[in-house]
Image (spheres, helix red, strand yellow):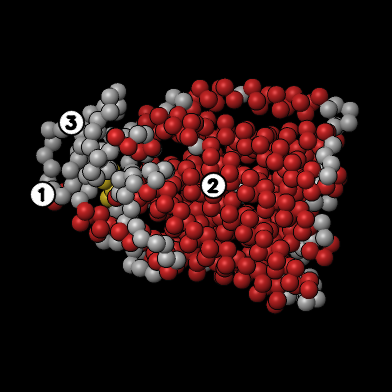
Amino acid sequence: RKCSKGTSQQYRSIPSSSQPSGGPKHLSSNENISPVDASIHYEPQEYTETDFLLPSKLYGTSGVSGSRRAKHADGAGAPAETICSMVLQILVPFLLAGFGTVSAGMLLDVVQNWDVFQEVTELLILVPAVLGMKGNLEMTLASRLSTAVNAGKMEPASEKWMLIVGNLALKQLQATVLGLLASMMAALLGWMAEGQMPAHHVVLLCSASVSTAFMASLLQGIIMVGVIIGSHRLGINPDNVATPMAASFGDLITLALLACLSQWFFSFMELYSYVLYLVDLLFLCLIPLWVVIASKHPASNLLLRTGWEPIITAMVISSIGGLILDKTVSDPNLAGIIVYAPVINGIGGNLVSIQSSRISTNLHLYYPPGEVPEDRRSCFNPCRTFFGSGANHRSAQVLLLLVIPGQLVFLHAIHLIKGGHTLPSPLLTVSFLSASLIQVFSLLCIADCMVHALWRRSKDPDSYSIPYLTALGDLLGTALLSLAFLMLWCVGDSGSV
C-alpha cells in the first residue's frame, strides 16, 4: 500500500486492474490494510501520471469505490481547503502575473515603434502566438508536475529528477518546433493579408521566433520547476500557484527577448544575412538531443509521440488572434488597444489554467480514465460550473470574482506607469471590464466541459486542455477588446480623460 500526501488533503493512488508486462516494479503486498481504508483496494504497483494514456486494457474497474468517488466528486467530502486559504494562494501569483502582463503591454506599446516592427509588420501577428507558448508549454508543464506532486509521483528522488529532466527536454523540443511553425504561420497570414511577403522577412521571423521560444522556454522551465518543488515543501497546493506563476513574468521576458532579438537580427540582415540561417540551423541541430533525453522517461516519451496536436492547434488559434491584433493596431483610431491586449489575454489564460489544473488533478486522483462524475455525464450546463458545494465550484466562483477587482488594479497600474497624466475614461473602463468578464466566464465554462470531455475520452487534460484554453483566451480577449475599442471610436470616446 502506498499513500502520498497532497498539500491540504491525503491523496491515494488509483489502482489498475492488471499489471502490464515489463511494467512498473511491484510494491510489497504483504502489508495489512487498516479497517478505515477497507473500502479502497490497492494494487501492489505504481504508474506515472500519464500511464492512463496507454491502451485501456491496463485499466479495469476503479479501485476507489463508487460511494467514495461520489463523496469526493469535485472535491466534495474531501478535507478541502478553505475559501480563505484558496483565495490567498491564488491571489499573490495572480497579482504577480497581472503586473507581468501590464509590463508586457507597456513594453509592446514602446517596441511597436522600433524599426523592425515598422518594417516587418508580421511581427505583431507573431506576438500572441509566441506569448501564447506559455500556455502551450510552461502551463502544461506546471499542470503536469502539479498533478505528479499531488499524486505522490515525485517522492522518490530518482523518479522526480527523471520526470523533471524528461519534461524539460520535451519542452525545449516543443519550443523549437513551435517557434518555427509560429513564424511560418505569421508569414502565411501576413502574405494572405498583404498579398506579398519578402524572403528576408520570412528568415527574420524564423530566426527571431525560434531563438525567443528556445531561450524563454529554457529560462521559464527552470523557474517553474523551482516554484513547484518549493510550493510543495511549503505545504502550498501547486495547482493554485504554479500555472499563474508560470506566466507571472513570462510575457515580459518573452516579449523582451522577441523585440531585442528581432531588432538585433534586423540590424545586420542586409550585410550578414547568413547569420540568420546559422541561428536556425543551430537550434534545429539540437532537436535529436532533446528527443533522446525526453524518450528516457515514460511520461515524456509518451507525450513525445502524442502531445503535438493540442499545442500546434493552439498556436494556429493564437495566430488568428495575432492577425486581429495586427489589423486593429494598423488603424490609428484603434492603436491604443496594444497596451491592453496582453493584459486581458494574460489574465484570462492565467485564471482558466488554475481551474483546468484543479479539475484535472481531481480527476486523476478519484476517477479512472473514461469515467467522470455523475453530474458531468449528461448534457453540459454552464450553471453547474459555478453552482455547487464542491471545491471546483468554489474555485470557479473565486476566479470569476477576482476578474473585476483585479482588472481595476491593473488598469490603475497602467495609468500610473504612463505617468498619471490621463485617466481611462469611464466608458473605456466599463468596456474593458465587460470584455474581460465575458472572456473569463466563457473560458471557465469551456474548461469545465473540455476537461471532463477529454477525460471521458481517456486523454490527459494536463497536456491537452490548457493549450486550447489559453489560445481561446487570446482569441476571445483580442476579439472582444477590438470590438470594445471599435465601439468607443464609433461613439467618439477617446479612451481617456
Is the residue under label 1 in contact with that under label 2 (CB below 8 Å)?
A: no
Question: Element under label 1?
Answer: helix
Q: Is residue 410 above or below residue 12?
A: below
View extreme (front): residue: 379
In the image, taking residue 477 as reference, residue 442 lies left or right, namely left
What mark, if any, has residue 28 been given in the picture? Answer: 3
Quarter of the figure with the C terminus: bottom right
The image shows residue 412 at horizontal and vertical percentages of: 66, 68
Q: Nearer the viewer, residue 158 or 474?
A: 474
Q: Are marks 3 and 1 in contact (CB under 8 Å)?
A: no
- Residue at image position (23%, 43%) is 61
Total numbered labels placed on residues in the image = 3
How many C-alpha atoms fall within 10 Å of the one at disc 3: few (<14), some, or many (≥20)? few
Is residue 115 left or right of 497 when viewed as pictured? right
The Cα atoms of the two marked residues, 2 and 1, are separated by: 43 Å
* Distance Cα–Cα, label 3 vs label 2: 39 Å
Amino acid type of the residue tagged 3 in the rendering: Ser
Q: Is residue 336 left or right of residue 429?
A: right
Q: From the viewer's perspective, is residue 227 above or below residue 80?
A: above
Under circle 2, the secondary element is helix
Residues packed near mark 1 inside 10 Å, few (<14), some (14 to 19) or many (20 plus) = few
Quarter placement of the N terminus: top left
Q: Which residue is mark 2?
A: 467
Q: Is residue 453 above or below residue 479?
A: above
N-terminal label among 2 and 1 = 1
Amino acid type at mark 2: Pro
Residue at position x 35%, y 34% in the image: 55
Q: Position of residue 250 (x, y in %)?
A: 61, 47
Point out which mark residue 35 bears: 1
Residue type for callout 1? Pro
